[in-house]
Amino acid sequence: MRGLLDEIDAVVASGEWRRRGGALDLLVRLVQRLRSFDNATHRPKGIALFAALRGREADTDALIGRLEVDCEQRDQLLAGAQAGLKAIQRGESPGVDDPGTLLARHAALLRRDLDLEDTALHAESAKLLSPEQWSTIVSSISTVMSGASSRKRGSTRHRQAK
């Protein structure tokens, strides 16, 4: 995810995305790839881990709550940026919210949350979860991710059949 954020940052910094063309199309694809990766891989891991940790300690619940609120905010920022980018692709004004600013705010929030996951959430997980519980979480993540892959393959086959 950090690599995708870096790629998005570079395109936004160039300013070339503000007009129709290759840089704008690239930025739209990168943002969609980031959203798809988050929905298919990153988010299912968080859901499984949060479910296993929730209710064990007040500090852990507060951390989970913060990450969940941040996730909702990131979703809103990314949706707003995508809407603005699509408007530019159509030759329209992106509206009052600058997509570049929304993407920068999204990236800053996501990087902060990834850092929290790598430090505080990892420490809480190591403290509160047994190896058996980790095994259960990994198994549930694998099930969710394989289900998402199956649905994606099925929708691809359906589109190809049309």
Image (cartoon, grey):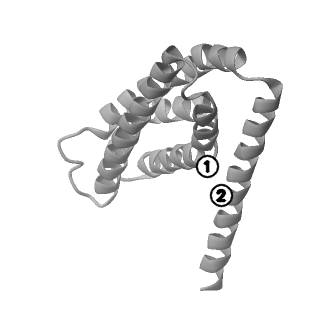
Instruction: Report the side of 131 relative to 9 (left or right).
Output: right
Residue neighbourhood size for the residue with mark 2, other residues' Cα within 10 Å, grouped as few (<14), some (14–19), many (≥20): some
Dot 2: what SS? helix
Q: Amino acid at mark 2?
A: Ala
Identify the disc placed on residue 148: 2
User: Image quadrant for the C terminus?
Assistant: bottom right
Q: Earlier in the sequence, mark 2 or mark 1?
A: 1
Instruction: Report the side of 132 relative to 92 (left or right).
Output: right
The x and y percentages for residue 53 are: 61, 27
Dot 1: what SS? helix
Q: Amino acid at mark 1?
A: Ala
Q: Please say if 88 is above or below 57.
A: below
Q: Residue at x 44, y 35 (%)?
A: 71
Q: Residue at x 63, y 16 (%)?
A: 124
According to the picture, the residue beneath numbered tag 1 turns out to be 40
The x and y percentages for residue 146 are: 73, 55
Residue neighbourhood size for the residue with mark 1, other residues' Cα within 10 Å, grouped as few (<14), some (14–19), many (≥20): some
Q: Nearer the viewer, residue 46 or 114?
A: 46
Q: Residue at x 50, y 26 (%)?
A: 64
Q: Please say if 144 is above or below 49.
A: below
Do the numbered discs 2 and 1 sit on residues whose CB atoms are within 8 Å? yes
Residue lying at the far left of the rendered structure:
96
The x and y percentages for residue 38 are: 56, 42
**How far apart are the alpha carbons under marks 2 and 1?**
7 Å
Q: Nearer the viewer, residue 43 or 126?
A: 126
The x and y percentages for residue 62 are: 45, 20
Residue lying at the far bottom of the rendered structure:
162
